[in-house]
Image: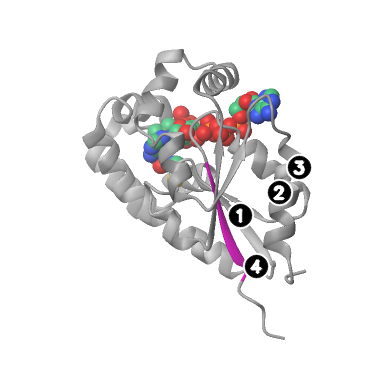
């Protein structure tokens, strides 16, 4: 039996928007989810060419006893657009090809790729449909600071390295509002019915 190529759906949204929460709901419906943050971290710890490129650009301090020093790297890249572009330039192509391989091996009807920087990383070109999760900045800050124990200034620095909600909404085909007025499940179920139609 030939496997159908799955429909690929990208889910994006800025820091604290709730895109991981949305992706957990898709996963509860049985949809395979590729987590780009986790994929990037795995590759940065296992892909020898990527590790060598990061060490060359960011120095020996980027790996402590062979383990990626995320705090150090974050301090380097979220304060310098040039450094962030250099890191993105080596990590993002590796994540895109890892996602392609992962999606190609599944027999699912549709799959989801979660990425905070879907457009910025070129992952938008790997997917057929794009959903962006929007939420007021005040809520995003509260959620991200509460979850990561990062400072408000650290979260704001990441926000400045990303597109804003209006830019993502202009590029995405679908928007999920994760504010205090809209229900997440209702919006996810509506999209699942659409992406899953004729595919189950
Ligand atoms: C700098 C690193 C080591 C910091 O690790 P840390 O555990 O603190 O953060 P984590 O990866 O879990 O990301 C948390 C959030 O930060 C923001 N963020 C991460 N990477 C980026 C980026 N390249 N550009 C803008 N925002 C980003 C996102 O909102 C993300 O959801 C890490 O973020 C990283 O390696 N980033 C570059 C790779 C990348 O782009 N990953 C994201 C998707 S491919
Ligand atoms: N509708 C909601 N109501 C209450 N809390 C929420 C809601 N949506 C998300 N949260 C909480 O806000 C925090 C951030 O959500 P989540 O991790 O899904 O965001 P994210 O967009 O994936 O962020 P990041 O880019 O940092 O990975 C989490 O602690 C989550 O439980």
**Residue matched to label 4:** 106
Residue 124 placed where, x, y %?
44, 55
Cα–Cα gap, marks 4 and 3? 27 Å
Distance from the alpha carbon under mark 4 to that under mark 2: 16 Å
Q: Which residue is mark 2?
A: 26
Magenta-colored span: 6-12
In the image, what residue occupies the spot 67% across and 84% down? 2
Discs 3/2, front: 3
Name the residue rendered at 66%, 63% in the picture: 110
Q: CA distance from mark 1 to mark 2?
A: 8 Å
> Which structural element holds mark 1?
strand
Q: Secondary structure at mark 2?
A: helix
SS under mark 4: loop
Q: Quadrant of residue 62?
A: top left
Q: Is residue 96 left or right of residue 129?
A: left
Find disc 3 in the rendering and name its residue. Answer: 186
Label 3 and label 2: CA atoms lie apart by: 12 Å
Disc 1 target residue: 112
């Amino acid at each position: 039996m030939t496997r159908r190529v799955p429909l690929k759906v990208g889910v994006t949204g800025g820091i604290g928007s709730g895109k991981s929460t949305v992706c957990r709901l898709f996963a509860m419906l049985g949809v395979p989810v590729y987590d780009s943050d986790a994929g990037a971290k795995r590759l940065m710890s296992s892909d020898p060419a990527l590790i060598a490129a990061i060490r060359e650009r960011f120095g020996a301090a980027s790996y402590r006893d062979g383990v990626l020093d995320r705090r150090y790297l974050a301090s380097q890249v979220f304060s310098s657009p040039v450094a962030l572009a250099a890191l993105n330039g080596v990590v993002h192509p590796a994540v895109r090809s890892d996602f392609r391989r992962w999606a190609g091996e599944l027999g699912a009807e549709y799959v989801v790729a979660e990425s905070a920087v879907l457009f910025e990383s070129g992952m938008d070109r790997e997917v057929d449909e794009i959903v962006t999760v929007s939420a007021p900045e005040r809520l995003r800050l509260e959620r991200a600071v509460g979850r990561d124990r990062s400072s408000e200034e650290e979260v704001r620095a990441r926000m400045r390295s990303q597109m804003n909600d209006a830019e993502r909404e202009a590029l995405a085909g679908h928007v999920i509002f994760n504010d205090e007025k809209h229900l997440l499940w209702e919006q996810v179920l509506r999209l699942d019915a659409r992406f899953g139609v004729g595919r189950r």
